[in-house]
Amino acid sequence: MRQKSFMKFQPIIFCLVITIFLCLPFLNGQISIGPDTSFHLNRIEALSIAIRSGDFYPRVFFEQNFNFGYGSPMFYSFFFLYIPALLRILGVNLFYTYQIFLFGSCLFASLSMFYCASYFLKNKPVYSYITVMVYILNCFYMSDFYKRGAIGEVLAFIFIPITIVGIYHSLFDDKSKNRILLFGFCGLLLSHNISFVLMVILYGILILLNFKKLLSDKKRCFNIILTAITGFFLTCFFTLPLLQQMTGSRYSINGYFGTLSLSDYAMNFGSIFDFRTDASNYLCDSVGPFLLFIPLLYFFMNKSKKTQFMNFLIISSYLMIFMTTNLFPWKFFTIFSFLQFPTRLLIPASTFLAIVGGYALLNLNLHETYQKIFNTILISILTVVSMIQLYGIYSTYGIITPITTPAEIKNDLQFLGYESWYNIQELSTPDYLPMNANIDYRYYGDQIKTNSTSTLEIIDSSSTNSYTLKVSQLKKNEYFVLPKTFYIGYVAEIKDGDKVVCILDAVSDQDSGLVTIRIDKDYVLQNPSLHIYYKGTSLQSLSSYVSIFTLIFILFSTKRQG
């Protein structure tokens, strides 16, 4: 009985051990500042502040970027950041909050891959364990985890294996298991937008390759379409407001779509074989030796054991790795400029290669005795190499320590040694600021620009979300430019004393991209004032209700089926 109980929990114990092993560099008591580290740390802190203020689903982090506000929640989902934000509310230090969240993310990624590997490898635990090891202990994942600070990509590693199992069921196996596909894609979308789009494209290619087969199986087609529609409704609380902002105004992120060549960001071919993880290599943009070479065994397998799906995984993986280099003609593929960096392709490639690698090891044509010896040697080498690579990370100096305060983490001058026109520590690249905004947020101050000749008095600016301006009159064509970054959803209440007379939608100032209120007519009021704040949009409210009702429906139908 005890042995059965142990066998049942053995995968969890193994994944926990792998997670602890990967997290050993935490013992150096430091966090390195990578391209996205401070961005995500500040997102966690901003979300905790919003929740404390009673804003449980903030659309704008109002205190960010020198109190101009930053609308990253509408463009980059923070769904899973509630976990670390709640830890902050409970009083956990931001340093440890970040490490706990990374630990949990790694553990779930390990469990996710074990589930995926067990499905494809016929429940052969040894090969599933090896698959988990090469998946988690690869250079690119280590770099995301420690050096790049890419929390979104780290979360994507949880859901891509689930998505792959769901894709396989939808096209080749039990078509009724559409909940797996739904869960995988929805989780991926709420983790990392770019990884989601990549997996949709890859799924689309697989659908095209099997189009004739699908046409002859109408129920399978219906399940795929139904899953897509359900997934849209379930996540429209995020996707529709995102599309509303991107189509209704112009932000820096709009410039990434079909306009740029990724050639300047591509790697040298030799970087594929650069497995260094220490300080001599700023970011390791290689999947590492094991993911790179173990899957090659697939080409030496018996032809009868090869499948179309595994063929697709391995061919697309090596193609994506090649696409990260400057040998790929990126100038002809500006359609992929949404990737920002070609190395994003390594996210799905890593997952695909791990699965194919495990599959190839399982189907090696070796005698059982030799197979066991081979597996033992492989695991030993993998462990030793991983220890060396983790030591490289452990020995890398990190500037964030347990005594670093949240205020210090947003201080770019202290951490970076220089200042810019926006807060780099909080925003990283300013993807969600208005495009071509001619403004220095750091030194702009709290000035209000207007063409009004009336007396202007700020009577309440205590809230980072709102301004209340007392004016002597309001005339048609007058405008007021507030020190707030514009996002669709800002409004101004025209009030006479405490009475709201009219509500005007704010617009974006063409020069600065700030919130601008334009008076539409002459107002004759005894005690006029303007109350400007972020109200949100009808679409935001409606899409939230749709997603909630869809979730309730799914839970109810699942209970009935159970």
Image (cartoon, helix red, strand yellow):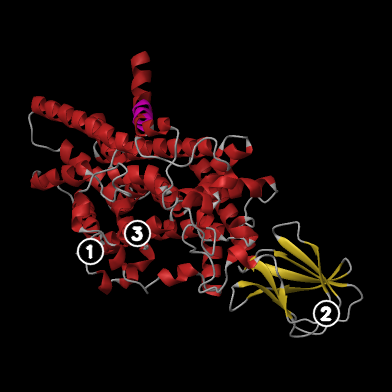
In the image, which residues are magenta?
13-20
Asked if residue 283 lies left or right of residue 488, the reply is left
- Residue indicated by mark 1: 326
Q: Amino acid at mark 1?
A: Asn
Question: Residue 534 falls in which quadrant of the image?
Answer: bottom right
Q: Nearer the viewer, mark 1 or mark 3?
A: 1
- On screen, 468 above or below 174? below
Q: Residues within 10 Å of mark 1 (few under 14, many from 20)?
A: some
Q: Amino acid at mark 3?
A: Leu
Q: Are marks 1 and 2 in contact (CB under 8 Å)?
A: no
Under mark 2, the amino acid is: Ser
Which of the two discs, 3 and 2, labels the residue nearer the N terminus?
Answer: 3
Percent x, y of residue 147: 38, 45
**Residue located beneath label 2 in the image:** 454
Question: Is residue 560 a member of the stretch shown in magenta?
Answer: no
Residue 480 quadrant = bottom right
Residue at x-position 59% and y-position 62% = 442
